Amino acid sequence: MTADQSGLRNQAAAGLAAAITGHVVAAAPFLYTAFYVVPDSVFMAAYLTGALELVLFVVCMALGFGLRPSSPNLAMGVLSGWVFGLIAIPCGGTAVIGFLAAVI
C-alpha cells in the first residue's frame, strides 16, 4: 500500500467516525432519560433526538454529496457512517439497556 492509498483510507475512516459521533451526540438526550427514567421528559427527549437525527441527516447528505467531486473517499465515509450509525446506535443502545435491566 502506498502513502497515497493510506491517506485515502484515513479520509474514509475520518468521515465514518464523524458521522457515527454525530449519531452518538444525537442519541445522548434519549439515552439520558432512558437511564434516569424521567417520565415527563421522555417525549421531549424523543422529539429532540428525532430533530437532531434530522439535522444530522441533512448535514451528512450535504457533506457527502458536496464533497464527492473533490474528496470522494471522505464523502463515502460520511455517507457510510450515517447509514452504519443509523443501524448500530439504536441496536447498541437497546442492547445496553437490556443488559443493564438484566443485571439490575
Image: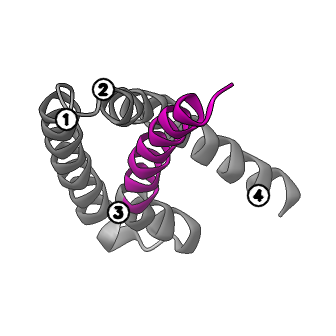
- The amino acid type found where label 1 is placed reads Leu
* Residue at the disc numbered 4: 100
* Residue 95 placement: quadrant: top right
Asked if the residue under mark 2 is in contact with the one under mark 1, i.e. CB atoms within 8 Å, the reply is: yes
Residue 14 x/y as whole percent: 47, 47
The disc, 3 or 2, on the residue closer to the chain's N-terminal end is: 3
- The amino acid type found where label 3 is placed reads Val
Is residue 77 shown left or right of residue 75? right
Q: Is residue 35 above or below residue 1?
A: below
Asked if the residue under mark 3 is in contact with the one under mark 1, i.e. CB atoms within 8 Å, the reply is: no
Q: Name the secondary structure under disc 2.
A: helix
* Residue at the disc numbered 3: 42
Q: Residue at x 49, y 48 (%)?
A: 17
Q: How packed is label 4: few (under 14 Cα within 10 Å), some, or many (20 or more)?
A: few
Q: Is residue 40 above or below residue 14?
A: below
The disc, 4 or 1, on the residue closer to the chain's N-terminal end is: 1
The disc, 4 or 2, on the residue closer to the chain's N-terminal end is: 2
Q: Quadrant of the C terminus?
A: bottom right
Q: Residue at x 55, y 28 (%)?
A: 5
The disc, 1 or 2, on the residue closer to the chain's N-terminal end is: 1
Chain part drawn in magenta: 1-25
Asked if the residue under mark 1 is in contact with the one under mark 4, i.e. CB atoms within 8 Å, the reply is: no
* Residue at the disc numbered 1: 67
* Residue 80 placement: quadrant: top left
